[in-house]
Image (cartoon, rainbow, N blue to C red):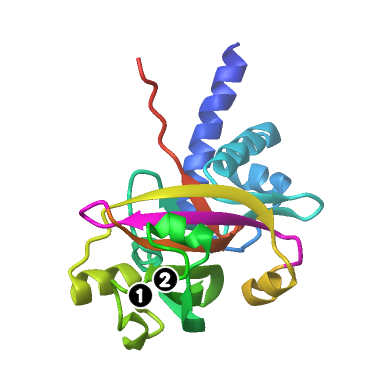
Amino acid sequence: MGNRRNRSNFADQVADELERAIHTQRYPPGHQLPSIETLATDMEVGRSTIREALRMLQTKGLVEVVHGRGTFISSKRVIRSSGSLHSFTEITRERGMTPSSRILQQEISTASHAVAARLQIAPGDRVNVLKRLRFADGVPIALETSISPYVRFRDLLEQPWTPDTSFFALLREKYQVIPHSAQQTVCAAMADAKESLLLEIEVKHPILLVETITYDQHGVAIEFGQNRYRADRYEYRVLLKREE
């Protein structure tokens, strides 16, 4: 029992030291860590202690184990936490990354029955459709389709959409509309040929399919979003509380 406790304490110390090295960029994202044997020798601990420390770092999402190759520092991810409503631009900047985008489609269309139900409008009503490829530090992260009621935002698509334009910021500044709450559904999916080409991933690579209905400060639907995120670069964190 004593040896197991000591090994656990050593593993905590090793994990802390490696985590500091990661945060100070001694081991940058994508960098391969030295072998378990090398780390054990350099840090003067047993290999089992190193393995336990690496498991701790893997649980935190700081390292990724690639079988047959070794352990690598995880690439930066865009992380969305439950309970907060922020745009892709805001979330990316909070992570210390630079957001940008490329417009793929920009048009006025008509609402299908499914879209109309989500936006609380009539089928056939005009809607603004904006499709963008979103980047973080130049890496493609998401394919975003934003659909909004034309009657509410008639000149939305005429605005100067720059690579770093935030849809939420535009709503606040141009239309005095505050995105207040949202209903969101998250599903697992696999990228098709077109999605894989744009997101620079393999066909059938895992992606997150996220559908969001955003409401303004009066509870009126202002946007229906259909977004596809790279599962290796986008992460959802959910806080759960037990109800007594």
Residue 115 appears in view: yes
Say if 48 sits above or below 236 in the image: above
Task: Kindly identify which residue carries mark 2.
Answer: 125
The disc at residue 150 is 1
Q: Label 1 sits on what residue type?
A: Tyr
Q: Position of residue 176 (x, y in %)?
A: 17, 69
Labels 1 and 2 touching (C-beta < 8 A) = yes
Which residue does the image show at 33% across and 64% down from the upper left?
90
- Residue stretch in magenta: 202-219
Q: Position of residue 141 (x, y in %)?
A: 54, 67
Which residue does the image show at 61% across and 17% down from the upper left?
3
Q: Position of residue 232 (x, y in %)?
A: 61, 57
Q: Is residue 217 magenta?
A: yes
Classify mark 2: residues with Cα within 10 Å, few (<14), some (14-19) or many (20+): some
Q: Nearer the viewer, residue 225 or 102?
A: 225
The kind of secondary structure element at disc 2 is loop
Q: Which tag, 1 or 2, sits closer to the chain's start?
A: 2
Q: Is residue 47 left or right of residue 29?
A: right
Image quadrant in which you'd find residue 33: bottom right
* Quadrant, the C terminus: top left
